[in-house]
Amino acid sequence: MRRVPEPNYEYEIARLVSAYTKAMYRIATELQRLDVSDITRANSAAALAEVVRILTELNGQSSEWVTRNLPIAATDGVAAAIYALGVADTFEEARKIAKFNRMNKAMVDAVIADTQADLLAVTQNVERKVRAAVRQVTAESMRANMARGVNGRRTISRDILDGLRKKLGDSVNTGIVDAASRRWRPEVYVDMLTRTKMAEAHREATQNEALDRGVYTFVVSRHGATDGCAKWEGRTLKLSSDYPGDYPTIDEARAGTLFHPCCSHVLTPIRKPIE
């Protein structure tokens, strides 16, 4: 069995994560400029407008990144199948002749749309939280000043001021809450999401190309995993229960802890299954 080169997209993923990190820093800086001791509605509106501008710019960058990089991962997946099945002598040659069949064209379009939607959800959540926090802090600041009857920095206690600033800061730090109720910083979530989507595109493309060539069995790569993937390393899987062979299906393996978020395991198609 030919060993397929492991995909590595660290540089490109780091660039996208850096864009989110910088955007969140810019938003936090903008919010820090607000004088929480005496916020006016005009000041809060101006800050929110700048936040929206930053996030809109970020959405454009992320959409372009997805459109450019997801097809690269899928192409590598196609090339992996071509090379593993002996159609090309080298992986580089396989990549040059790699083309998307009908299944892979549909898959790439779908994963691009899904990833763009997931990334958009991150910025929408940040905007929603920031907008709610700014409005709440503005109202609380105005109420505190009205209760004192004056408009000066000394009229609001330090505890109240610190609490208002914390609300603004927290609105940026939590970009999304997942199905398991885990709270993620935007840049951390984006790192996990893009790693997962790139790996999925690679694996799906490999499967589709192999099936198009009449191959439906695959071997899971070995990385010396110590998590739930460990028991699946080196094992032979088949596409579905419709195909012959006493092997677990890929879906069964996935349900049994293989291919978790950020999983780096790949599938290598093989014509003669390893017993």
Image (cartoon, rainbow, N blue to C red):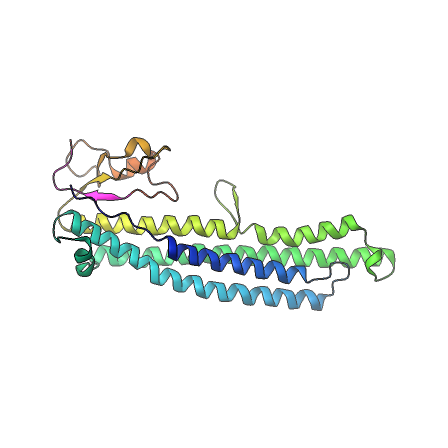
Q: Tell me if residue 211 can be seen.
A: no
In-front residue for pair 97/215: 97
**Residue 271 vertical position relative to residue 124 in the rendered view, above or below:** above
x 58%, y 51%: residue:
173
Tell whether 120 sits left or right of 238: right
Q: Is residue 49 left or right of residue 234?
A: right
Front one among 78 and 18:
18
Q: Residue at x 44, y 51 (%)?
A: 191
Q: Left of 51 or right of it: where is 193?
A: left
Position of residue 189 relative to residue 231, above or below, is below
- Residue closer to the observer: 52 or 231: 231
Q: Main secondary structure of the magenta part?
A: loop
Which span is picked out in magenta? 266-274
Quarter of the figure with the C terminus: top left
Q: Position of residue 71 (x, y in %)?
A: 30, 59
Say if the magenta span includes residue 111: no
Tell me what residue is drawn at x 56 percent, y 49 percent.
Answer: 174
